[in-house]
Image: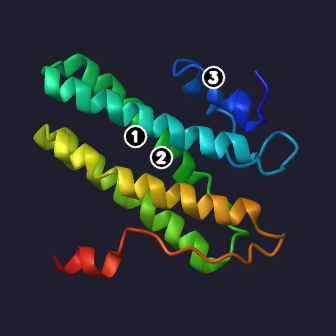
Amino acid sequence: MPLSLPMEEARNVSMQQLPLMLTADPIRGLSGDRTDGLILLGLEGIVEYMRRIRVAIERRDAAAKKSAMERAQQIVQHLLVNLDEDLPTEQLLRLDSLYRYLLLKLAHANLFNEAQAILACRPIVDDLRGLWMVILSSSSEHSGSFSGQVDFERMLVG
């Protein structure tokens, strides 16, 4: 399976193929180039697994929840550890914080079997997608700005 996919092809990849594709570096392909499609595909995969987690919680299907939760967390962890350190510090820190916060919220949903906690993860994924869109569409200096939905200052207070 190719490492770099156009978005149209990336959307047609089955959820079973996604973890196999992410064993390659999702940020850089074999040539070291940024592979926009895989980053965004990974985020779409997280959204799909969150949907599966929510459905499994509602149906009280522990096995399905466990499987989907593991896959979602694996994708988030892989995207986190493969962040490009060449990104501007502000964007790198924001991505790092969002990925870690998403892992925390997924763990909370898993621990307490809360479908609402899974729904609360969606704005985090939307922020990740928005920030990546700014980064990927910007010039080589990554000179874009992004104002997300997740406010870490407010989150820590309340």
Report crowding for label 2: few under 14, some 14 to 19, many 20 or more residues within 10 A (C-alpha): some
Residue occupying the point 52% across, 38% down: 44
Q: Residue at x 18, y 18 (%)?
A: 61
Residue visible at 26% across and 44% down?
Answer: 118
Residue 77's label in the rendered image is: 2
Q: Do the residues labelled 1 and 3 touch (CB within 8 Å)?
A: no
Look at discs 1 and 3 and give the one toward the viewer: 3
Q: Residue shown at 33%/27% (left/top)?
A: 52
Camera-side residue of 18 and 139: 139
* Disc 1 from disc 3: Cα separation: 19 Å
Q: In the rendering, at what x and y percent does residue 64 appear?
A: 27, 19
Q: How crowded is mark 3: few (under 14 residues within 10 Å), some or many (20 or more)?
A: some
Q: Which residue does the numbered mark 1 point to in the structure image?
A: 73
Up the image or down, 1 lies above or below 111; here it is: above
Res 13 label? 3
Q: Do the residues labelled 2 and 1 touch (CB within 8 Å)?
A: yes
